[in-house]
Amino acid sequence: MSQHRVVLLLGSNIGDKKNNLDMALEKLREKCEVVKISEYLTSEPVEFVSSNNFCNIATVIFTHFSPIQLLNFIKKIEIEMGRINDTKISGSYSDRIIDIDIIKYDELKFSSEKLEIPHKKHLFEREFSRILLQNII
């Protein structure tokens, strides 16, 4: 099996945000090799209104998972950590204990009902994402 280089973006705006991000990284390490982690960055919510700011990080991992296997693993981590609403299912953004997005997966271009790679909003539209990604990609 070959290793795939994947860029993830993690965010939390409920509870102990930095601890939530650190816990998610530990869970990622159970099945993936985490090779780079950005600095923490605080940002305001995007595309929804909340008084809770986000704490965000970007990370580079190596994994044997396919894109869909990785998505399923990430969703499992989010559920284990207490995330209730999935944006794809609910159709809207809300506060969340953890959010993990696949930004890039090698140089793959992939689109399905559940997943789009690369994640264009984070790469091109969201300022906080560009700040986090500029030193990690």
Image (cartoon, rainbow, N blue to C red):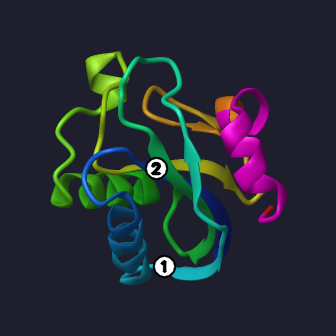
Q: Which of the 4 quarters of the picture holds residue 5?
A: bottom right
Q: Nearer the viewer, residue 28 or 73?
A: 28
Farthest residue in the front direction? 51
**Residue type (three-letter) at the residue carrying disc 2:** Gly
Q: Position of residue 47 (x, y in %)?
A: 50, 18
> Label 2 vs label 1: CA separation?
18 Å
Q: Which mark is residue 52?
A: none
Report the residue marked by disc 1. 32
The residue shown at (65%, 37%) is 119
Whether residue 1 is visible to the viewer of this picture, yes or no, is: no
Query: Taking 125 as reference, is 42 above or below it?
Result: below
Regarding mark 1 in the picture, which secondary structure is present there? loop
Residue interval drawn in magenta:
122-136
SS for dot 2: strand
Badge 2 is on which residue?
Answer: 11
* Quadrant for the C terminus in the image: bottom right
Q: Position of residue 4 (x, y in %)?
A: 65, 70
